[in-house]
Image (spheres, rainbow, N blue to C red):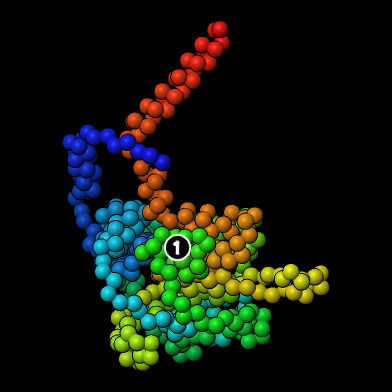
Amino acid sequence: MGYVAVRGGGRAIEESLRLFELERASSGASVALDRVQACFPDAIDQVMGESSLYAPRLAALAFKQARGSVEEAVFLLRAFRSTLERTSETCVVDMEDMQVKRRISAAFKDVPGGQVLGATRDYSHRLIDFSLADETDGDVRDAAARLRKHFAEAPDDARFDGHLPKVLDYLRDQGLIPSCENDDTPPADVTMASLEFPCVRSARLQTLARGMTQAVEAFGYAAIRGYGPAHPTVGELRSGTVELCVAADASDDADPLDAFYLGDMRVCEVESVFEVESDAADASGAGLSFDIGYGLVMGDTETKAVAMSVLDHCLELGDPRYPTQDEEFVLYHVDGVEAQGFISHLKLPHYVTFQSKLDTVRTARERQAHAASV
């Protein structure tokens, strides 16, 4: 697509930006970043995940500057991320070492370590709580103190150390899910190189993990609804914190115990189970087995992680009959910054190109009228 640059309107643009800043400042009140983080944790998680930058305070600043627009905050944080120097890479993280805050399985009622519901709104009534309209800081502190006391009095058998085995290891031990060897191939980096099709799986997973949350969920829903043969059972969903470390020695034989600890990161991991059949499958059920779709996202964006696991499975199959199994269709269109940028540019001046279209249509009409008069 070609574009023609048009100069002019600089003063009007400057005044427009001043007017926009006036709208922000007209409230006469400012919100501290600590309060933004405390009040909008889900939005902060979404901004960090789609920006590929785990920085809660910076995400809160971008969210504040964007006046609550997640897509604009993602744009700001990605732009900032592009200025950062990459000094090192972390050691490989084993998700079995996660400090679990919440772990559920929709496949099994009884799992090793039990179902850990954790903090979730999944079982709540979606009704507006009007008492929050008059809530004060004192009310929040009182509620926190009351609830902390309640959980401090919980019996010892309701506590656990935060480490739980993987649920799907049970199916792997029975041979119902294939065991995979660890692949130590250096992963692709979609932030440093453009996507090339067909993609390696690491590039697909990165693109889905940093994709627009609602787009990933929409494509995942489409795959389940019929635009792809994918109806999963969530074998395990676990969320919690994982430790990030950097090796003290860059050599391959460096002792992991000598690694430098950087900090914890909150993540959500999903392993979904899909029933698949081989070419030799028959009516008796021979040839049936299970396959796994994988999702891993920053923060607690659980629905996105589930949808990501669906799309991971779809893209592994790669059946061209289904749009949700088309790598280019899915991966190019889940990127929120790409989508927002291109759609937003349609609001900018296209005077010259549209004038060309007008000339083309008018010329065609004149030729048609001339031909009709002959």
- Look at 66% across and 74% down and name the residue there: 290
Relative to 38, say whether 362 is above or below: above
Residue furthest out toward the right: 284
Q: Position of residue 108 (x, y in %)?
A: 62, 78
Question: Viewer-proximal residue, 243 or 134?
Answer: 243
Relative to 248, say whether 356 is above or below: above
Q: Which quadrant is the N terminus positioned in?
A: top left
For disc 1, the marked residue is: 207
Q: In this rendering, would 122 be left or right of 149?
A: right
Q: Position of residue 10 (x, y in %)?
A: 20, 37
Q: Position of residue 299 (x, y in %)?
A: 40, 69
- Look at 51% across and 82% down and name the residue there: 182
- Look at 39% across and 84% down and name the residue there: 152
Question: Viewer-proximal residue, 35 or 267?
Answer: 267
Relative to 257, say whether 365 is above or below: above
Q: Which quadrant is the C terminus positioned in?
A: top right
- Look at 29% across and 58% down and name the residue there: 79
Residue 191 visible in the current orientation? yes
- Mark 1 burial class by Cα count in 10 Å: few <14, some 14-19, many 20+: many
